[in-house]
Amino acid sequence: MLNCHAEIKKIKTQTKFTIALAGNPNVGKSTIFNQLTGLGAVTANYPGKTVSLNIGPAEFRGLAFGIIDLPGAYSLGAISEDQFIARRAILEKHAEVVVAVVDATNLTRNLYLTLQLIELGCPLVIALNLIDVAAKQNLLIDAKKLSQLLGVPVAPIVATTGEGIDKLIDTCAKVAAERLKINPRLPRYADEIAGLVSGLSEIIKNNLSSRPYEIRAEALAMLLLEEDEEFINYFKSDKIDSAAQKKIKQFFSIIKTGDKEKMAAKIVAARHGYADELAQAITLHTKTDKTTLATRLWRLSLSPLLGLVMLIAGLIAVFSIMYYLGGFLSFNFERLWSAFVSPYIKALIFWLFGHNAIANTLLWGLDAGIQASLSVGIPYILTFYLILAFLEDTGYLNSIAFLTDSLMHKIGLHGRSVIPLVAGAGCNVPAIIGTRVLTTKREKIIACALISLTPCSARTAVIMGAVAFFVGWQWALAIYLIDFLAIAATGKGLAIFLPGKSSGLVMEMFLFRRPTVKTVLKKTWYRFKEFIIIAAPIITIGSILLGGLYETNYIWLIAEPTKFLVQGWLGLPAVAGICLLFGILRKELALQLLLTLAIMQYGSGMQNLLSFMTKQQIFIFALVTTLYIPCIATVTVLMKELGWKIAISIALFTITLAIIIGGLANQILNLTHLL
Ligand SMILES: Nc1nc2c(ncn2[C@@H]2O[C@H](COP(=O)(O)OP(=O)(O)OP(=O)(O)O)[C@@H](O)[C@H]2O)c(=O)[nH]1
Ligand SMILES: [Mg+2]
């Protein structure tokens, strides 16, 4: 939080005003943020992507301002870490203008939070988003009427295309400069509630010298009546003098006895009722509902049997695209490098350093190392990012979560954990951060442990680039299958071992949304750019280090102590152990170093991996790489999220698992001669 505060302060000194984007999960807040800042906050069609504040400077038609993108929340109450962050940012009034981003296709649910923001007295502008989807569903929303009913400006927008954003920002600027006065209309509640609110707010006004976050007395009264934990505790604390505490206590003792149904529930119901009334009043169904293709596909994806068929077909499609497109890119990248770049790099290095060990060591990194990443890292990772961005934006992951809910329960999770788990297939790091949306520590630990075993894009690159390519696609599938079984068994084990129960599926479902080419490509590019920035230096330095060890013959010395395990039990060449060690830096580095080794020993060309290792060894190597200790970035983020003890336990567990499974697979293959 401290960092966020510093960042917000910085933005505030640099710009004239700041906008906070608040709203339900999955309504397009981060899409607006990206449109205005040009940054790459994670967006996808499922709830809970943003789990901490995204802060950035923005410029729109010469106007400089700051933007804070908040995690999604259905109400001001917070049941998970991400929602708590959103609540804090709203209460602490970080921004001059709060934009309530509202999903035009889901008005009742969305307007609930908007009403709470109005009650709090936030300087509000409503962004009525997803009007393109609403139009497809034959819904016509009367933005003007909404604005009149609530006394708040409303700007209809399509965040993905940027339509209407200019007007939105224009309105925000006017509100910030107080050129546009807002007269919000507070919801009118039934006498019973209104009476209590006014009674309690009078006590607050008369007895409190200052109010937390300077919230309006009426809003504070409402929050207390809603049994908001933070404010109840505040009023019980020594920040409130005992006379005031006594009066408030007295007030509550009266209503408790006179009321059967809980007041909190009544207020929630009343606010929902009003939100629904508003939604009805401003929505016009233009035609009778016509089921669109997207809706039909969506329904199909959720049906128990056909949904499963669709899932399997989907997985086959993903696998095939990876195999063919990844393979195509790999082949051509390598060919282009060998033909047009490699000879010149070699000539340059030899010209600069002469034919000696130093030149050779440098070539490990600058030629063979890069060639290895062009052959096995980049093509598959790029392809996978592209597929993932597409799947994320359609919203299919939501359907998978729903479909696999009962299966997930068996391994101590509920369907909602599927989303971070599948996101782990892209990269374990954001997936682990994404578990902040889960509400219990138990679920978080299980999800993080399983994410650490999920083959990320780097591990997929190893499986596809080495096993599918050299050994056969069936063997690549076998690795996924073994890994999946390991994940299921680990989940089951943890579910039994860790006390507590898995919570029920509480997840909003979203219809499929048509991804735009721009957002898919942009997202792929952002991830890939990050990959290049982080991976390229590590890969080059890693290759040079390995080259140094090789050229000086130290490699054999270092390999010696692990020989019994690497050669004896796993049946791999002794130096493979060192590559596995390097793989902790980045998973695909393990294979790339092996390939680098092969290239340096047998000359350019991927096929040389087969001169270096047998098919069985390649399979075992990839299997171990998939299972053993997640990369250093993942371990670091595990430490941050769960503490070092759990992080180290997960790391040690995966190493043990990899050695046991890898060794057993080696023994079985030795006996059966399947490879
Ligand atoms: N068709 C259409 N899609 C949109 C629009 N706005 C956002 N989307 C898509 O809706 C999905 C959700 O958008 P996000 O920006 O990630 O939503 P968010 O509110 O930040 O979600 P959380 O961070 O999970 O709370 C993405 O796939 C977007 O591409 C829109 O106006 N029209
Ligand atoms: Mg977001």
Image: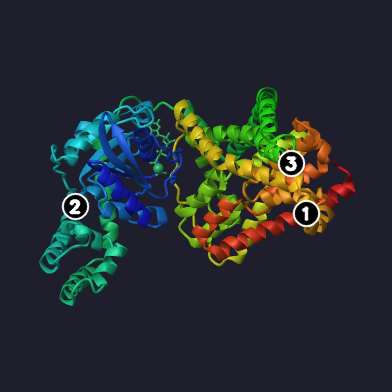
Q: Nearer the viewer, mark 1 or mark 3?
A: 3
Q: What amino acid type is highlighted by mark number 2?
A: Tyr
Horizontal placement of 163 versus 149: left or right? right
Q: What amino acid type is highlighted by mark number 3?
A: Ala
Coordinates of residue 279 in the picture (x, y in percent): 27, 38
SS assignment at label 2:
loop
The residue pinned by badge 3 equals: 357
SS assignment at label 1:
helix
Residue at 19 percent across and 48 percent down: it is: 187
Q: CA distance from mark 1 to mark 3?
A: 20 Å
Of mark 3 and mark 2, the one earlier in the sequence is 2
Q: Which mark is residue 189?
A: 2
Q: Is residue 602 above or below residue 590?
A: above
Of mark 1 and mark 3, the one earlier in the sequence is 3
Horizontal placement of 624 versus 211: left or right? right
Q: As rendered, which of 518 and 639 lies closer to the eye? A: 639
Residue at 76 percent across and 48 percent down: it is: 552
Q: Which quadrant of the render holds ligand 2?
A: top left
Q: Are marks 3 and 2 in contact (CB under 8 Å)?
A: no
| Farthest residue, direction left | 206
Characterize the local packing of mark 3: few (<14), some (14-19) or many (20 or more) Cα atoms within 10 angstroms: some
Q: Is residue 272 above or below residue 2?
A: above
Characterize the local packing of mark 1: few (<14), some (14-19) or many (20 or more) Cα atoms within 10 angstroms: some
The residue pinned by badge 1 equals: 559
